[in-house]
Image (cartoon, rainbow, N blue to C red):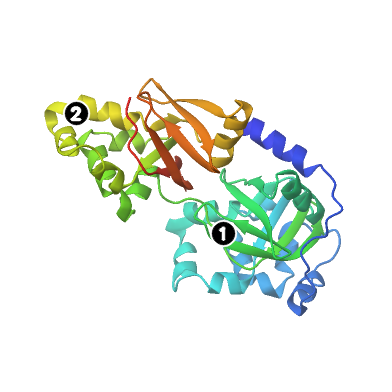
C-alpha cells in the first residue's frame, strides 16, 4: 500500500502548473539562494549556507552525510539555524548526543522526500490534490503541503507548521527548499495519544480494563474512532460501570475493538471511500463486523450495527502506529 501511495504521489508531482510559487523575495531568501554553486550536492549546498550550520552539524552527528551525498535524488526541506533555535531550550543539544542518534536520524529524514521535486511540482501537486499535497518522507511518515496566503506551508504529523521561505536550490543529486521551522514525525503511539487527552480518560480506562494496551501499542497500523468522555456518559446509567467489571471483559473488548480498523485510514481516505461508494462506505472493524461511514451536512458520520450514529468531530491525530479520529458517541456491535 505504501508503495502504491508513493507511486500516485510521484504522478502528482509530474503534473505541470501555471500557478506561481510562494514569493521568496526577502533579503534572507536572496542571501541563501546566492550561497551555493551549481553542481554541488545537497549536503554541500547546506555546508555553503551560513543559515544552515546547525542542520549541517545535525546531519554529521546522525551519520547521514554519505547517504545524502549519494545519487538520490533527494528533495530536502532545510530548516534554518533560527528554526532550530526556536525549539525548546536544550532540545538541539540533547538530539546531538550519541545516545539520541536514532531520534535525530528520524527527525532529519522526515525533512527528506525521495525524488527531485522543484517548487512548480509542489504547487502542481497541491492543486491536483484540491489544496493538499501528501509528501511521503524518507523517514516513513508524511508532510502535508498547502498554500496559505500565497505561501507554501508544510504541516507535520503533530500539527506544527513550517513556511517555505526559499526554493529551488538545485544540486547534482537533488534540490533544497528552505523552511522556517523544524518539522517532526509522530512521536507517540495511538495509546499514548489517548492517554495524553483529557477528553478520553474513560476510553483509556476501558482499554486498560480490557487488556488491550499491549495490542494497541503494537506495530499496527490501526485507525481508531475514539469516543470522548461525554460519549460514554451519554450511555444508559450504569453501562460503563458494568462493562468495566472483570466478568464483562469479553463484552468490553468487543465494544472497543468495534472502534478499531486495521490499517491507517486518514480523513482523506475515509471521504474518498464515501465518494467512491456513492455516499456510503463500509468499514470493517477488527471486532469482525462493519461500520457504515457517510457524509451529512458536510460532516462524516459512522452508523453502527444498531442504526445509531456518531459524528466525527476531529480527525487525523497521527501516531507512530496509526491514526485517531474523535467521535461524539459510542458505537456498538
Q: Relative to residue 251, is residue 77 drawn left or right?
A: right
CB-based contact (under 8 Å), mark 2 and mark 1: no
The residue sitting at 35% across, 24% down in the picture is: 306
Q: Relative to residue 173, is residue 298 drawn left or right?
A: left
The residue sitting at 23% across, 33% down in the picture is: 210
Q: In this view, which residue lies farthest toward the front?
A: 297
SS category of the residue bearing label 1: loop
How dense is the environment of label 2, judged by Cα within 10 Å: few (below 14), some, or many (20 and up)?
some
Question: Residue 87 location in percent, x, y?
Answer: 50, 70
- Residue carrying label 1: 183
> Does the rendering let one see residue 161?
yes
Could you tell which of marks 2 and 1 lies nearer the N-terminus?
Answer: 1
Q: Relative to residue 24, is residue 287 drawn left or right?
A: left
Between 237 and 127, the residue placed more toward the observer is 237
- Residue carrying label 2: 249
Question: Residue 137 location in percent, x, y?
Answer: 62, 47
Between 236 and 117, the residue placed more toward the observer is 236
Q: In this view, which residue lies farthest toward the bottom?
A: 27
How dense is the environment of label 1, judged by Cα within 10 Å: few (below 14), some, or many (20 and up)?
many
The dot on residue 86 is none
In this rendering, which labeled residue sits more in front, label 2 or label 1?
2
Amino acid at each position: 500500500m505504501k508503495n502504491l501511495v508513493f507511486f500516485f504521489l510521484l504522478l502528482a508531482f509530474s503534473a505541470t502548473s501555471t500557478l506561481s510559487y510562494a514569493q521568496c523575495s526577502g533579503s534572507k531568501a536572496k542571501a541563501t539562494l546566492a550561497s551555493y554553486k551549481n553542481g554541488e550536492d545537497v549536503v554541500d549546498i547546506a555546508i555553503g549556507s551560513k543559515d544552515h550550520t546547525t542542520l549541517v552539524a545535525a546531519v554529521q552527528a546522525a551519520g547521514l552525510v554519505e547517504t545524502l551525498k549519494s545519487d538520490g535524488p533527494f528533495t530536502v526541506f532545510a530548516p534554518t539555524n533560527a528554526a532550530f533555535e526556536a525549539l525548546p531550550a536544550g532540545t538541539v543539544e540533547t538530539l546531538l548526543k550519541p545516545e539520541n542518534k536514532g531520534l535525530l536520524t528520524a527527525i532529519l529524514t522526515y525533512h527528506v522526500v525521495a525524488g527531485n521535486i522543484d517548487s512548480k511540482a509542489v504547487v502542481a501537486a497541491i492543486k491536483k490534490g484540491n489544496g493538499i499535497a501528501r509528501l511521503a518522507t524518507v523517514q516513513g511518515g508524511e508532510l502535508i503541503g498547502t498554500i496559505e496566503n500565497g505561501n507554501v506551508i508544510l504541516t507535520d504529523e503533530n500539527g506544527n507548521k513550517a513556511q517555505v521561505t526559499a526554493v529551488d536550490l538545485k544540486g547534482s543529486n537533488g534540490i533544497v527548499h528552505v523552511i522556517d521551522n523544524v518539522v517532526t514525525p509522530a512521536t507517540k503511539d495511538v495509546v499514548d495519544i489517548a492517554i495524553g487527552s483529557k477528553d478520553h480518560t474513560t476510553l483509556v480506562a476501558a482499554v486498560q480494563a480490557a487488556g488491550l494496551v499491549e495490542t494497541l501499542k503494537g506495530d499496527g497500523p490501526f485507525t481508531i474512532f475514539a469516543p470522548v468522555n461525554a460519549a460514554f456518559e451519554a450511555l444508559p446509567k450504569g453501562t460503563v460501570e458494568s462493562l468495566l467489571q472483570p466478568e464483562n471483559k469479553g463484552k468490553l473488548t468487543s465494544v472497543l475493538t468495534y472502534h478499531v480498523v486495521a490499517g491507517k485510514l486518514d480523513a482523506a481516505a475515509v471521504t474518498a471511500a464515501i465518494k467512491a461508494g456513492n455516499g456510503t462506505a463500509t468499514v470493517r472493524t477488527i471486532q469482525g463486523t462493519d461500520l457504515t461511514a457517510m457524509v451529512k451536512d458536510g460532516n462524516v458520520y459512522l452508523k453502527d450495527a444498531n442504526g445509531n450514529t456518531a459524528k466525527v468531530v476531529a480527525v487525523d491525530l497521527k501516531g507512530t502506529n496509526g491514526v485517531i479520529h474523535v467521535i461524539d458517541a459510542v458505537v456498538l456491535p
